[in-house]
Structure formats: structure tokens, C-alpha cells
Image (cartoon, rainbow, N blue to C red):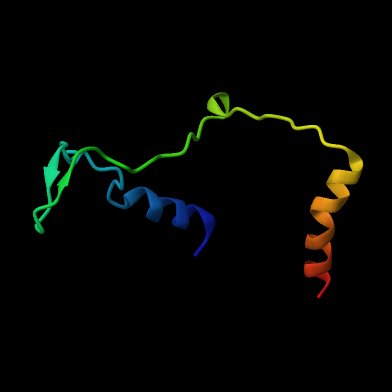
Amino acid sequence: MNASQYIENRRRKVERRGNAVTTQFPIITTQGICIRHDRRYTPERRISGIIVKEWRVKDSTFELLFQEKEKQNNN
């Protein structure tokens, strides 16, 4: 199968993103347990929403922290 046939086959597939109704909370399970809120978490996929923090440590502390990992990886 060449690339253009592959792309055409992908485009003919059914849409994966559905418009199914989301669950409304609170909800009662079949076991009678009340779930008050959704505990799922969707990670941020946009680069603008990611926060990176830099931590400074002494070289000696860094060596101590990563010394054991190096030994484990070499075994």
C-alpha cells in the first residue's frame, strides 16, 4: 500500500471524537456508592500551560542523589 492509499484509508475512518454526553456528578454507582465529583485529571497538552521550575542544588548533593542510580543502571 502506498502512502496516498494509506492516507485515504485513514480519512475514511469513523470520527473517533464523539459527542457523547458527559457524566453529571454526583452519581450513584450500582453498588450504591455516591461519587461526588470526577477524580480524573487530563494533563495539559498545550505548551503554554506547562510550568517548569528550576531547582539549584550543590554539586555534592547532586552527585549523592544520582550516584545510586548510576550504580543500579550499570548492574
Quadrant the C terminus occupies:
bottom right
Point out residue 61 in the picture as x, y percentages from the top left corner. 85, 44
Question: Residue placed farthest to the right in the image?
Answer: 60
**Residue situated in front as seen by the camera: 52 or 11:** 52
- At x 82%, y 36%, the residue is 57
Point out residue 49 in the picture as x, y percentages from the top left corner. 53, 26
**Residue situated in front as seen by the camera: 22 or 2:** 22
**Residue situated in front as seen by the camera: 28 or 13:** 28
- At x 83%, y 67%, the residue is 71
Point out residue 15 in the picture as x, y percentages from the top left corner. 29, 46
- At x 37%, y 48%, the residue is 11
| Picture quadrant where residue 59 is located | top right
Question: Residue placed farthest to the top in the image?
Answer: 48
- At x 60%, y 27%, the residue is 51
| Total numbered circles | 0
| Picture quadrant where residue 5 is located | bottom left
Point out residue 3 in the picture as x, y percentages from the top left corner. 53, 55
Q: Is residue 25 left or right of residue 51?
A: left
**Compared to 68, does 51 lie above or below?**
above
Q: Is residue 4 left or right of residue 9?
A: right
Q: Is residue 50 left or right of residue 22?
A: right
